[in-house]
Amino acid sequence: MRQLIENIKGKDIATAPDGTSQEVTYDFDVYEEMIPAANQAMIPSGLKEIRGRISPACFFNVRGVILQMEDGRKMSLVVTDTRGSLDATPIE
């Protein structure tokens, strides 16, 4: 079972591996897989999935796009379609 644990929205700069940058607006949902435990309780597994969108839809299917977010976090993005849907992975 997945549980929504965070929604992240903002406007920042996405940069492709070739150095091309684009200002984008983003909206991510962070889900965490939950594991059943005793007494019908659920505990976090630590396995997270980040899905969302950016606008404008840029860098379609380019691997290694980095989004530097206003809160200091960085995400590696892959824009999966022309509507701006994406998969994201935090950069630690």
Image (spheres, rainbow, N blue to C red):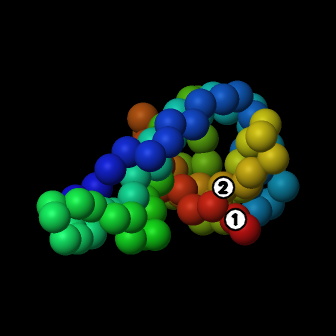
Residue 12 seen by the camera: yes
Residue under label 2, please give it: 75
Pinpoint residue 14: horizontal percent, then vertical percent: 73, 45
Inspect the image, locate mark 1, and give the three-letter code of the amino acid beneath it.
Ile
Pick the front one: 38 or 23 = 38
Check disc 1: other Cα within 10 Å, few if <14, some if 14-19, many if 20+: few
Residue 34 point in image, percent of width and height: 30, 63
First in sequence, mark 2 or 1: give its number.
Answer: 2
Name the residue: 50% across, 37% down. Answer: 7
Looking at this view, name the residue that lies furthest to the front: 39
Image quarter of the N terminus: bottom left
Q: Position of residue 63 (x, y in %)?
A: 60, 65
CB under 8 Å between discs 2 and 1: yes
Report which residue position mark 1 lands on.
Answer: 91
Using the rendered image of the protein, determine whether residue 81 is visible from the camera's viewpoint: no
Left or right placement of residue 67 versus residue 33 in this view: right
The residue shown at (70%, 65%) is 91
Which residue is depicted at the point 39% across and 71% down? 45
Residue at (28% x, 55% y) in the render? 2
Q: Which mark is residue 71?
A: none
Q: Quadrant of residue 64?
A: bottom right
